[in-house]
Amino acid sequence: MSTTADAPAQDDGAGSGALTDGFHLVIDALKLNGVETIYHVPGIPITDLGRFMQAEGMRVLSFRHEQHAGYAAAIAGFLTKKPGVCMTVSAPGFLNGLTALAHATTNCFPMILISGSSEREIVDLQQGDYEEMDQLAIAKTLCKAAYRVLHAEDIGIGVARAIRAAVSGRPGGVYLDLPAKLLGQVLDAELGAKSLVEVIDPAPRQLPAPDSVARALEVLKGAERPLIILGKGAAYAQADDDIRALVERSGIPYLPMSMAKGLLPDDHPQSAGPARSLVLKEADVVMLIGARLNWLLSHGKGRTWGDAPKRFVHIDIEPREMDSNVEIAAPVVGDIGSCVTALLDGMGADWTAPPAAWTDAVRDKKDTNIARMAPRLQNNNVPMDFHGALGVLKDAIAERPDAILVNEGANTLDFTRSIIDMYKPRKRLDVGTWGVMGIGMGQAIAAAVETGCPVLAIEGDSAFGFSGMEIETICRYELPICVVVFNNGGIYRGTDVNPAGTDAATTVFVKDARYDRMMEAFGGVGVQATSPDELRQAVKAAMDSGRPTLVNAVIDPEAGTESGRIGNLNPQSVVAKK
Ligand code: ADP
Ligand code: MG
């Protein structure tokens, strides 16, 4: 405890005589549980809390907008398997952070949103307090758990509950409401210290039932054309060696979901990434490891999955995920590390690799697709197209496999995901389950802060706009982040015209915008790149120097398609003409 300095110097006659207060109990409770980094925006009533945290040796990063502090906390949770913590002011700040909390919950990332709030007495009587809002009631519907602490002696329990709720079972977002009055409450320091709770084994292992493992192995053994799909839950689990061992021992081709890329290197002989359409259509048994059969996998049915009947093995920590979209022949419920180890143990000496007819077909398709793509990535066209630019950035990651790639946009997302190979686990961070725009700078900042690795953020010009102001944050903390904005002058493309001839079309931006100059405004490095060669030089210089850099990569405004690869999700009007 290091709490007495800021507490009022008075003796209430209890315990040791020294005092603590709500501010310092929050700090002590977080530190006791290993929380050392806070992503936040200061303001009433948490300004002093941030100051005191910093004074007590915590790393407190101030953002320009709560949503980005929240996205940073969410991805910190994914990267570290510990809850990332975002802290905001009341009502509007809370709501700004809530988007990220809901995003964390949807993506199964552990995160805690701590928000200051107004006085209960006034809020509950709706008497119009400063930033009045019943935040707890609102948060409850959008996260995994929500708690409010009213008494300083309950802060320890409140923080402990929040941590355990965030990381145990299926991870998710937790809201912790701290009314302004709580922070100033005074308590005897010794009683305060005793009230703290250290969370023992916050995410206990969950062993799969042996019969569920045996059933899964039976289904896999009967397969002619088996496939493994690795999701971001598998990346999150940090069971990298066991997952690799299982894939290699099984001999089964595998498909990584976007944020599972690199769990095994993308150039692994069993990777079926470049043969995605074929394996989804043709596989007869599919084992999902930490991946959901949601829209990103076409709900496990329909054209993407072809006509051949399929049987699914599903490994997940959440029992209710089973049968969410289609029947699961072999549910295996438990933590991924334990499930994968149990499957490996159960495979035994007589395990046989899948039929060569299948693995050869997958390899042929993959080789064909890679060979077809290669020359497009070598092009030196000016203006650049997506392939010319991404050919350069693909090399940049191959040369620096430790770098973390952050990626958002529409076409910029789709092309980058399929073109840039990843070589190590948890190095690709992106828009996640919602396909949300705006995660870019928050994720880049947290990635740099949590790992110390250099970050390359590949951003569509529209996507970048959501979080662009955070480049000031990047410069302020001097983070090794290189942002490449794929600037094609608009959303999807930069060529739309308003047929009514009045305002600019709804999807276009200012022509020839110079995003690089935004970075210069804050003392970072800005570079305009109009050719693949210029882009290569700029990114190399940025990654070598580690200085905050923004490269305005000028892309042909004609390049790009409506909504990237998910244009099919747009409803069509039968009466209107575009
Ligand atoms: P992707 O989008 O990459 O397919 P999803 O987010 O759909 O991945 O799926 C991740 C799944 O991983 C979720 O269903 C979640 O419950 C599960 N999960 C997360 N962590 C673990 C873990 N440690 N053990 C088992 N399952 C996990
Ligand atoms: Mg664009």
Image (cartoon, rainbow, N blue to C red):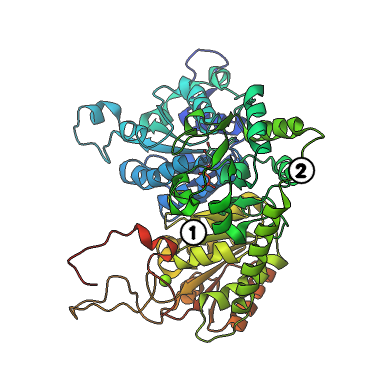
Q: Secondary structure at mark 2?
A: helix
Position of the C terminus by quadrant: bottom left
Residue 475 visible: yes
Q: Is residue 501 left or right of residue 496?
A: left
Q: Amino acid at mark 1?
A: Gly
What is the distance, in whole Å, between disc 1 and disc 2 at their CAs? 37 Å
Q: Is residue 359 above or below residue 514?
A: above
Looking at the image, which residue is at 64% across and 75% down? 374
Looking at the image, which residue is at 18% across and 78% down? 502
Q: Which callout, 1 or 2, points to the residue nearer the camera?
A: 2
Q: Is residue 376 above or below residue 284?
A: below
The answer to which of 298 and 470 lies nearer the viewer is 298
Q: Earlier in the sequence, mark 1 or mark 2?
A: 2
The quadrant of the rendered image in which ligand 2 is seen is bottom left
Q: Which residue is mark 1?
A: 440
What crowding class fits label 2: few (fewer than 14 Cα within 10 Å), some (14-19), or many (20 or more)? some
Q: Which residue is mark 2?
A: 249
Q: Is residue 304 left or right of residue 216?
A: left
Q: Is residue 347 left or right of residue 22?
A: right
Q: Secondary structure at mark 1?
A: helix
Q: Is residue 39 above or below residue 518?
A: above
Residue 269 in picture, x, y percent from top left: 73, 57
